[in-house]
Image (tube, helix red, strand yellow):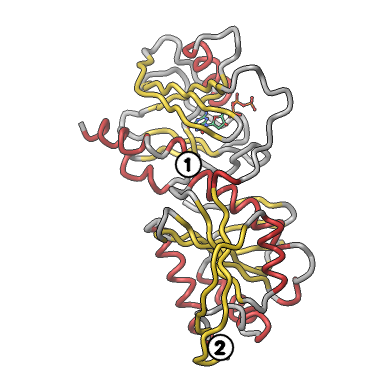
Amino acid sequence: MSLSLDVSPYTLRPLQPSDGTSVHRLVNDWSVVRMLSHLPFPYPRELADQWITSTIDRQRTGTAWHFAICDGNDLIGCIGLSLGHPGQAAKIGYWVGRDHWKKGIATTCLRPVIDWAFATLPIVRIIADVAEDNPASIALLARLGFNQTGTSRVPFLSRGPEPQPVLTYTMNRATQPVVPEPGLPATRILLVVAGVLVDNAGRILLARRPPGKPLAGLWEFPGGKVEPHESPEQALIRELDEELGIDISAGCIAPFTFVSENIGARHLMMPLYLCRRWRNTPTPREGQELAWVSAEQLGDYPMPAPDRPLIPLLQDLMAG
Ligand SMILES: Nc1nc2c([nH]c(=O)n2[C@H]2C[C@H](O)[C@@H](COP(=O)(O)OP(=O)(O)OP(=O)(O)O)O2)c(=O)[nH]1
């Protein structure tokens, strides 16, 4: 499974072993490497390969997420988030190759990564450490809504043993600007219904939100908003017909659990139904990707934050 975000005109995708040459060329540049505390200068070619391998391993274990910033087929920069920092924080780091500076690329690409991280990862804040003599990065973090929360001194491998002054910037989930939806209805409740379709092999159907929709690229249980005149069951029958071309009206749909979660301006209420029988073969009708996934593999698929607590429930259900 690979995670990619479409940040027109750029693409953000996981690093791959064939990126070693590009990473080395872009990072082995004094103006880039001097701002990255862990890297020596000159930057050896094999370090690029070792680092890429470590990003792939860490993504597999869910401890860090790295995105290559690509312009067409060309890798031009990178954004990484590592988990496991105190206070449910992720640490973000980024670089852009010198030829691509001053085009707003970091601003364009960091915003959706931050939105993705708050929507998907078990974190409440994102922190960034930046060298005090890096005014461009400091201005970028301020533009994105980070606040300075600390100072420290850290050795930078490329600059010798003397620790350098570093500023820590933080963005808390709660301080992310909440943009009220136009025409927000009187109720804050967003009523969405979703179905857990289980096939004969015990696999669960996930659908990937297509580009252009909010939370694009994340995997979810098929379903959608309940219209004012509908019951949740009617809405589920309609949504699964529209999205997958299947008919669940004759099978039994059993209430399984529900999600109740604040999602910014709205509060998501999402009854979740189990469904093991339907007519027709699920087919993506709205440009979405589909995947049949075993319960153990559910955690490998980045989902909206409200869905994550459902994973252990489904694993228990499928194990029982
Ligand atoms: N279907 C579904 N939606 C989910 C899940 N988890 C989760 O946070 N959501 C959220 C994402 C959206 O904010 C909302 C679903 O809205 P939607 O826009 O996909 O609904 P829809 O199919 O009616 O779409 P539209 O016609 O309004 O475009 O619920 C999930 O597992 N399944």
Q: Residues within 10 Å of mark 2 (few under 14, many from 20)?
A: some
149 up-or-down from 216: above or below: below
Relative to 161, residue 58 above or below: above
Residue at the disc numbered 2 = 158
Q: Quadrant of ligand 1?
A: top right
Spot occupied by residue 254 in the image (x, y as percentages of width and height)? 35, 16
Residue shown at the point (44%, 21%) measured from the top left? 271
Which-is-in-front pick, marks 2 and 1?
2
Residue kind at label 1, given as amino acid type: Met
Where is residue 258? Give x, y as percent.
Answer: 40, 24
Tell me the SS state at disc 1. loop
Relative to residue 96, is residue 245 drawn left or right? left
On the image, the x and y values in percent for residue 167 come to 58, 71
Q: Residue at x 52, y 21 (%)?
A: 240
Q: Earlier in the sequence, mark 2 or mark 1?
A: 2
Q: Quadrant of residue 139?
A: bottom right
Which residue has dot 1 on it?
Answer: 303
Ligand 1 neighbours mark 1 (CB distance < 8 Å)? yes
Left or right of residue 48, residue 25 in this image: right
